[in-house]
Image (cartoon, helix red, strand yellow):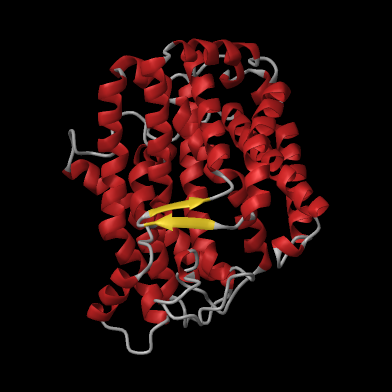
Amino acid sequence: MRKPNVALSNLRAVVIIIVLAFHSALAYLASAPAPHAAFDRAPYTWVAFPIVDTHHWLGFDIFCAWQDVSLMALMFFLSGLLTSGSLMRKGTRIYIADRVWRIGLPFALAALLLSPLAYYPAYITRTAEPTFVGFWRQWFSLSSWPAGPEWFLWQLFVANAFAALLYAVAPGYIGFLRRLAAWVGDRPITFFALLAGISAVGYVPLALAFSPWKWSSLGPFSLQLCRPVVYLVFFFAGFALGSYGLDRGLLAPDGPLARRWWAWLAAAGVGFGLWAGLTSLTLPDWNAASLATRLGASFAFPLGCAAGGLFLLSGALRLSRVRSRALDSLSINAYSMYLVHYIFVVWLQYALLNAGLIAAAKLAIVLTGAMVMSWASSAGFGRLMAGPLSVTGKRAVSPVPR
C-alpha cells in the first residue's frame, strides 16, 4: 500500500470500531426510553434500543450524539471515494450488477435472517411469556420489517446506482467533479464550506418539515426523512476526491488537510457543541420550539457533520505512516463485521442485564466481545468462502462496500 491507501485503510478500521462502540453504548444511555411498550405495538422504540439497561451514564449519550452527527455521512463519503474508478473500469451495467451482488444481496440477507436474530432479545424483554412461535407471529404482524443497522445498505445502493446511471447519460460529470476536487485540493476550508453549505440546502427544509428524528419505513426500507440529501452530498464529495486521486489534493498525506488535523479537531468539537447546545433547546418537543431555535439547530447540523468527518479524515492522513497487522485485518474484514456485529452486540447486552456492574464495565464487555466475535466470524467466513462469494478480499475494504 502507498501512504494514502494506508491512511484510508486505517480510517476504515477506526470507523468500524466506532460503529461497534456506538451500538454497544445504546443500551446504557441515560436518555434511552424505558422498555415498557409491547413488542408489537407503537412506538417500537426497540428498533433503535433493543436492550435498555438500568445502568447508564450520561457520557455515553454525548459520545453517541457526536457519532450520530457525523458517522453515517462519513461512511457514505468513504464509499464514494472508491466509486469513480470502479465505475469507469466496469461500465454502468456491470457496475450496477456488481452493486446488486455486493450490497443488495447482503441487505436482503440481513433483513430476512440477521435482523430477526438480533432483535429476538428485544422481544424476550418486552413479552410476558415469550415463545419462538410467538416471536415470529408478532414479527410478521409489524407494520414494517426492521433491518437493523443494515438500513444503510439500501440507501448506499441507491447512491451507487444514481452515480452509475448518471455516468451512462452524462459521463462528463466525472470530469467536472475531478476538476472541482483539483480546485479545492489546497483549499480545505473552501471544501468544508461547500460540503456544509450544500448539505444545509438539502437538510434544513426537511428538518424543519419533519424534525431531525422522524423516520419512515416501508418493509425493510427505512429512511430518516431529514438526511437523504446530506448522505448523497457526502457520497459525491467522496466521489469527487476519489476521482482526482487517492494521493492528491485534499487526500495527500502531507497536504493542508493532514497538516492541520488539530484545527479540524477543534472545529469538530465546536461544531458538535453548537449543534448540541441549540438542539437541546428544541427538546422534548421539536415542533413546540421557536422557529429561530429550530433554524439554528438545523443549520448547525451540517456544520458539525462536515467538521467531524474532516477531522477523522485529516487524522487518518496524518497517521498514514502507522501500519499494523491488526488495523489491516480490521479494514479487510470491516464490511462483513458490519453485517454481523449487531447480533453479538444485542445478545451480549441482554446477557448482562442482571449483572451488577457499572455501565462502563458492561460497555467494555459488550464492545470487546462483539469485536472479537464479529472479527472472528468475518475472518473465518472469508477463509471458508475464499473466492467470488467472499465479502472480504486481499485489499482493504471498508465498512461500506466498494
Q: Position of residue 317 (x, y in %)?
A: 58, 27
Q: Give the residue at x 27% y 39%.
A: 391
Quadrant housing residue 59 = bottom right
Q: Position of residue 8 (x, y in %)?
A: 49, 29
Q: Give the residue at x 49% y 68%.
A: 49
- Quarter holding the C terminus is top left
Q: Is residue 205 above or below residue 32?
A: above
* Pick the front one: 1 or 267: 267
* Pick the front one: 205 or 111: 205
Q: Give the left or right position of residue 355, taking residue 260 as reference.
A: left
Q: Position of residue 191 (x, y in %)?
A: 67, 23
Q: Is residue 177 above or below residue 127?
A: above
> Can see residue 10?
yes
Quadrant housing residue 373 = bottom left
- Quarter holding the N terminus is top left
Of all residues, the one furthest to the front in this rendering is 209
Q: Give the left or right position of residue 192, taking residue 174 as reference.
A: right
Q: How many marks?
A: 0
Q: Give the left or right position of residue 221, taking residue 183 as reference.
A: left
* Pick the front one: 381 or 300: 300
Q: Is residue 87 above or below residue 274?
A: above
> Can see residue 398?
no
Q: Give the left or right position of residue 268, taking residue 83 as reference.
A: right
* Pick the front one: 262 or 185: 185
